[in-house]
Amino acid sequence: MFRQITLRRSLCIVIGAALLVSTGVASAQNFSTTNQSGFGNRAETTQAGRNFSAIAQDGADNLADVTQSGRHNISGVMQSGTGHEVSVDQEGDRSINAAAQVSSRLSSINMSAEGDHGGITSEFTLQSD
């Protein structure tokens, strides 16, 4: 129970921070939210346009893969458990990446973002055991 509360609190903090520094959230065309609990789950999100994606995974051996292209890309991933991986690829102007892991064994977080000139690209990473 404590781990679930910590997971939700950390996800709220990470995504909240991403939303505070972003612009154009209200004009997002694509919204995706995924909440998984259990073993061996995989979440894959691909979006084009103005994008918002949030993934929360609680369990073991989960994988989150987010690909976004366009303007105002926002991605938040929160994982709890063991054996998790995060991959976020964003291409466009004003991209925000946020990922957090709460686990007994932390795994890789791979993020890449390409922004147009004059755009904003921000990345937040939080890992805790």
Image (cartoon, helix red, strand yellow):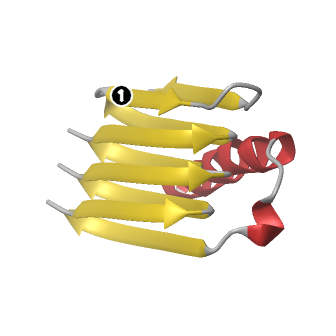
Q: Is 38 situated above or below 66? A: below
Q: Amino acid at mark 1?
A: Asn
Query: Is residue 106 visible from the viewing direction of this image?
Result: no
Nearest the viewer among 64 and 72 is: 72
Rendering coords of residue 122 (x, y %): 66, 29
**Which structural element holds mark 1?**
strand
Q: Residue 55 vs residue 95: left or right? A: left
Rendering coords of residue 68 (x, y %): 45, 52
Query: Is residue 38 visible from the viewing direction of this image?
Result: yes
Q: Residue 3 vs residue 98: left or right? A: left
Q: Quadrant of the C terminus?
A: top left
- The residue located at (64%, 40%) in the rendering is 96
- The residue located at (68%, 51%) in the rendering is 72
Q: Is 66 situated above or below 30? A: above
Q: Is 111 situated above or below 7? A: above
Label tally: 1
- The residue located at (34%, 40%) in the rendering is 86
- The residue located at (40%, 47%) in the rendering is 80
Location of mark 1 (residue): 110
Nearest the viewer among 10 and 76 is: 76
Q: Residues within 10 Å of mark 1 (few under 14, many from 20)?
A: few
Rendering coords of residue 124 (x, y %): 62, 29
Q: Residue 55 vs residue 70: left or right? A: left
Q: Quadrant of residue 117?
A: top right
